[in-house]
Amino acid sequence: MEAASSGTPQLIAGLKLVQQKDDAPLFFAVVPIYKQPSSTPQERLHNLKGFVLGVFKLRELFDASALSKRPLGIKMTLIDESDPSQQRVLYVHESRTSTPIVEGTEIRQPMPHFWGKTWSILATPTTSFMNHHSSFSTWVIALVGGGSSFLLAFFTRSILSRVNQIQALNRQLKTLAQEDGLTGLANRRRFDEVLSMELSRSHRQKTSLSLALIDIDYFKQYNDVYGHMQGDHCLQSFAECLRKAIRRPTDLAVRYGGEEFALLLPDTGSPEGVILTLQQLLKRAGIPHEASNVASFLTASIGVVTVTSGIASVSPSELIEHADQALYRAKNAGRNTVEYIRISHEKEEGTRALLRAIS
Ligand SMILES: Nc1nc2c(ncn2[C@@H]2O[C@H](COP(=O)(O)OP(=O)(O)OP(=O)(O)O)[C@@H](O)[C@H]2O)c(=O)[nH]1
């Protein structure tokens, strides 16, 4: 829990697992993972997603470190001093030379404070070390400095790379869960999420919001004439036009279902420009549709609803319902048509403009 509320990884040192075969001391690194960046303890606890647990053998760390590259003739004892009342020996690294250690010459060198731990290394030279080196203390400072950097780099690299892997996988899963497989546009689930977020924001900040529901005209006939596979390609090209029509990073292009799409345009009180661009893009794409009754190329009917700034309360489902009504009218008006509805101060002003589309 300390790791979760502080946001700092924690080390639990000197443990042994029940199933462990040797007696090498282990330590656990507990790294908290959050759903989103959180700055206060309350936020962290609220956004906690879980923990990544790393288990390490101190012996393996020492064996791989610069502290152990060649037998130096120094015995090193790793001590946990995080709790001053209860110092603990975590690991003893023997000198690996046959000569005896020189009693009373040990030096205690603190390691950098990290992840809530205060560790130090107690170094004791052997006679062979003393015979070959003049300054023991200089060696110890250099060794512990180098060894500590290695240990820290090892922790950071191995644990954080595991955290990064998990976060990358989570991001991928999240993207997959929010994306339409055929077109790569946002799917309905993402749309629902963003719509309710943007609607609340528009209420709060008194900004406008527009939603367009877009339905391809005579798509059943398209499939009948060109085949289902070509129908899929057609949906992908259509999605590309939607992608190009939007301009702001906050705009969202959605595959709403089947041959129905949506554009969510936050902070947009006049969506006419985007809609006109979409129609021009469709015309330029010129996807042949010989079975269409309104044009020789693929067209769409569009229903747009705009809530103007200052609107008090329209629910997501009400907004969709309005856009659906507008779309229904556009279809009824002969297709390849846009119908607009504006809602301001909780009333439909009835300012509907029927725009005959460019064909
Ligand atoms: N190729 C393909 N077709 C799809 C997909 N999803 C839905 N459809 C087809 O889209 C067609 C939609 O038909 P309708 O709802 O009658 O709409 P429409 O033919 O466009 O008629 P109007 O909207 O009234 O102009 C159906 O034939 C569906 O099979 C898809 O992922 N791929």
Image: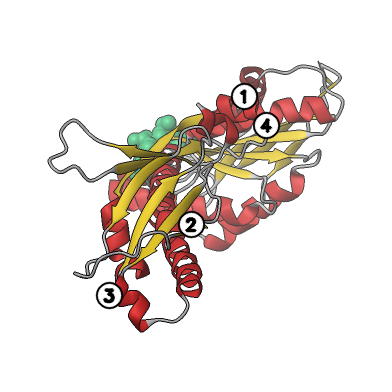
**Residue that label 1 marks:** 320
Q: Looking at the image, is mark 2 or mark 1 earlier in the sequence?
A: 2
Badge 1 crowding class, 10 Å Cα cut-off, few under 14, some 14 to 19, many 20 or more, is some
Residue positioned 43% across, 56% down in the render: 121
Question: Which is in the foreground here, disc 2 or disc 1?
Answer: 2
Badge 3 crowding class, 10 Å Cα cut-off, few under 14, some 14 to 19, many 20 or more, is few
Q: Looking at the image, is mark 4 or mark 2 earlier in the sequence?
A: 4
Label 2 close to label 1 by CB (< 8 Å):
no
Question: Which is in the foreground here, disc 4 or disc 3?
Answer: 3
Secondary structure, mark 1, is: helix
**Residue that label 3 marks:** 70
Secondary structure, mark 3, is: loop
Secondary structure, mark 4, is: loop
Could you say which quadrant of the image residue 37 lies in?
top right
Q: Image check: 221 left or right of 338? A: left
Secondary structure, mark 2, is: strand
Residue 200 percent across, percent down from the top left:
72, 25
Badge 2 crowding class, 10 Å Cα cut-off, few under 14, some 14 to 19, many 20 or more, is some
Return the mark for residue 40: 4
Return the mark for residue 108: 2
Q: Which amino acid does label 3 sit on?
A: Arg
Label 4 close to label 2 by CB (< 8 Å):
no
